[in-house]
């Protein structure tokens, strides 16, 4: 096992914290001039240097308020359509009260692209930048702004000025998760240019699944399919019979999906042949390979082509949007039901009102393929890196500690849920909040008829975005589930969704290649290759499945095309990047 820099940092932080606690305990009431353990400051000028010694005291990590002298920080943020006021705002006021820092806002356009353009123009025009920029950038954009000095590195601040961040993550996240938060936020030069936001719904990363009509299975006296062969026989029975009993033998759609988030029948079924998550590469024992040139991939395509060819898998799955599938599934007037099995997130396709039809469905596990493969694609739990301290910040230490304060557990929840005691509260009712083992209720929403959810309604309670706050999966999953308006909605959310999470959760190979942090030079070499390969693979798998390309006669030319696009070079650079990311 390699020992990571993070672990060292972790140990160092722990010792610093302990030493500080001891010193605080012994020197309370003494003068502050002997602050011998004060750790290195940044090389940036610190405007508090002329402040009184009491400011130095309050600058110790974990001590609030952060300042005793009037201090103002500016925050650049994209204006959210639902946030009516940022300054006269409950979360802003809470933050000001707790930290003692006054906050001013510089509002950027709501549209992400326009917001980035505005920021880029400010940089090139050498305009004064906000102290803190709440804006997500791509890995390479962030790296470029970092190396050109627009954003300052935060590494030392995590070592010396971070308290609540560690308190929250050590309580709720595993060592591996914490390691990943830093691993994927570190630029190729070793610097951390953005403050992470590790706010994760535990079920979402493995949400790709399939749901099947149990009523139809019962009508036919069939058991729940477990293998690709059994699934084939089941879908065939749906096709051949008037299984919904309306006198029409041909109106049933045995299996359908959609082209948007978590709607890919291709991804669901390919994982019965080989691990597949879109066009991602796979890894085995540290060695990368492209799943889409393997015989297993080809077998998967053959299987799905057979389903389409025999009318068992709807070709609409590859072209329709999630909203189009929802229109079918949530249409209360359409009786009887016509869909046998679907790949989609139940919370999305049944709408929020609750429809009777949900009661017919149950969740399917991943189907075992001919070689026993039955993975569930996993997107991983990745932090967002969406807040930066700019070069114009005169007081980066206070700016960083303000970010750190938002990471405190209760502040983190308030940023998302609203006012503690009004919109949410801690609870120890002891009921399981989530069906994944180990998730216990920690907090819950307080519900009022006349006060809708803060997150989805227009208000000046929150910023309607997560920045700098932390809810690792264990904390996110500790929120008690809500009351539901009717039994359909309850069945949809509890049984179909939450209770089926364990079927998919953690059902993936140990090594995943979800994120590769390329250097600019590597990107220059391969970004075009990568784009054309991914586009081609996506197009061709659909064409093979639909029979628009012939899996028997055109497979070799497909492989040759990938060769000529530069698959070897892409794999070589990807391997180099993967090795670098796993070496320190
Ligand atoms: Ca039928
Ligand atoms: Ca029928």
Image (tube, helix red, strand yellow):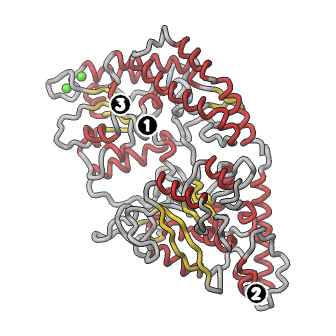
| Element on which disc 3 rests | loop
Kindly tell me whether mark 3's CB lies below 8 Å from ligand 1. no
Q: CA distance from mark 1 to mark 2?
A: 59 Å
Residue for badge 1: 209
The mark that comes first in sequence, 1 or 2, is 2
* Residue projecting furthest to the left: 247
> Which residue corresponds to the image point at 49% horizontal and 8% vertical from the top-left?
553
* Percent of width and height locating residue 183: 69, 49
Q: CA distance from mark 3 to mark 1?
A: 18 Å
Crowding near pointer 1: few (<14 within 10 Å), some, many (20+)?
A: many
Is 542 left or right of 100, judged from the image as shown? Answer: left
State the residue position of label 3.
319
At mark 2, the secondary structure is helix
Q: Quadrant location of ligand 1?
A: top left
Question: Which mark identifies residue 488?
Answer: none
Q: Residue at x 32, y 48 (%)?
A: 491
**Residue 418 sits in which quadrant?**
bottom left
Q: Earlier in the sequence, mark 3 or mark 1?
A: 1
Task: Give the x, y percent position of residue 94.
Answer: 51, 77
Image quarter (top left, top right, bottom left or bottom right) of the N terminus: top right
Instruction: Give the foreground label among 1 and 2.
Output: 2
Kindly tell me whether residue 415 is visible in this rendering. Answer: yes
Q: Residues within 10 Å of mark 2 (few under 14, many from 20)?
A: some
Report the front residue among 414 and 366.
Answer: 414
Residue 53 - label: 2
Q: Marks 3 and 2, how far apart in space? A: 65 Å
Which percent across, then down, holds residue 445?
41, 66
Q: Is mark 1 within 8 Å of ligand 1?
A: no
Q: Is residue 368 above or below residue 336?
A: above
Relative to 49, 421 lies left or right: left
Name the outermost residue toward the front.
125
């Amino acid at each position: 096992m390699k020992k990571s820099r993070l672990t060292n940092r972790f140990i160092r932080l722990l010792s610093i914290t302990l030493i500080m606690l001891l010193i605080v305990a012994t020197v309370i009431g003494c003068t502050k001039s002997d602050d011998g353990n004060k750790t290195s400051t940044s090389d940036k000028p610190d405007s508090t240097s002329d402040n009184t010694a009491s400011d130095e005291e309050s600058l110790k990590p974990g001590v609030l308020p952060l300042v005793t002298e009037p201090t103002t920080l500016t925050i650049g943020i994209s204006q959210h359509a639902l946030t009516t006021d940022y300054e006269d705002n409950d979360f802003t006021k809470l933050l000001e009260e707790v930290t003692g820092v006054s906050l001013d806002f510089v509002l950027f356009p709501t549209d992400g692209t326009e917001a980035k353009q505005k920021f880029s123009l400010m940089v090139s025009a050498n305009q004064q930048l906000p102290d803190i920029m709440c804006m997500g950038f791509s890995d390479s954009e962030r790296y470029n702004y970092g190396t050109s000095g627009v954003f300052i590195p935060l590494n030392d601040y995590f070592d010396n000025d971070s308290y609540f961040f560690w308190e929250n993550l050590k309580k709720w996240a595993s060592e591996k998760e914490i390691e990943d938060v830093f691993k994927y936020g570190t630029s190729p030069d070793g610097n951390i240019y953005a403050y992470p936001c590790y706010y994760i719904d535990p079920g979402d990363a493995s949400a790709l699944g399939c749901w099947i009509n149990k009523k139809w299975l019962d009508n036919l006296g069939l058991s729940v399919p477990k293998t690709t062969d059994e699934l084939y026989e089941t879908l065939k029975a749906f096709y051949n019979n008037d299984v919904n009993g309306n006198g029409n033998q041909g109106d049933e759609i045995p299996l359908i999906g959609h082209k948007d988030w978590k709607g890919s029948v291709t991804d669901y079924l390919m994982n019965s042949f080989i691990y597949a998550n879109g066009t991602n590469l796979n890894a085995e024992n540290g060695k990368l390979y492209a799943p889409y040139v393997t015989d297993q991939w080809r077998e998967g395509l053959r299987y799905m082509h057979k389903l389409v060819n025999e009318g068992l898998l709807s070709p609409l799955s590859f072209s329709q949007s999630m909203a189009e599938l929802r229109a079918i599934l949530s249409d209360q007037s359409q009786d009887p039901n016509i869909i046998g099995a679907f790949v989609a997130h139940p919370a999305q396709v049944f709408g929020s009102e609750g429809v009777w039809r949900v009661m017919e469905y149950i969740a399917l596990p991943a189907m075992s393929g001919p070689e026993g493969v039955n993975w569930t694609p996993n997107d991983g739990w990745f932090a967002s890196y969406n807040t930066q301290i700019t070069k114009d910040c005169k007081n980066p230490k206070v700016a960083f500690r303000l970010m750190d304060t938002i990471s405190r557990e209760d502040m983190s929840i308030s940023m998302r849920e609203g006012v503690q005691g009004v919109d949410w509260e801690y609870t120890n009712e002891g009921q399981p909040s989530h069906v994944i083992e180990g998730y216990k209720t920690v907090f819950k929403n307080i519900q009022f008829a006349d006060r809708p959810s803060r997150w989805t309604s227009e208000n000046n309670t929150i910023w309607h975005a997560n920045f700098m706050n932390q809810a690792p999966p264990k904390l996110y999953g500790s929120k008690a589930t809500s009351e539901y308006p009717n039994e359909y909605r309850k069945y949809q959310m509890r049984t179909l969704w939450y209770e089926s999470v364990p079927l998919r959760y953690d059902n993936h190979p140990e090594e995943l290649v979800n994120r590769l942090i390329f250097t600019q030079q590597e990107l220059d070499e391969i970004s075009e290759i990568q784009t054309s390969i991914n586009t081609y693979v996506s197009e061709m798998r659909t064409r093979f499945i639909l029979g628009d390309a012939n899996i028997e006669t055109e497979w070799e030319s497909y492989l040759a095309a990938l060769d000529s696009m530069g698959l070897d070079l892409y794999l070589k650079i990807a391997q180099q990047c993967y090795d670098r990311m796993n070496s320190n």
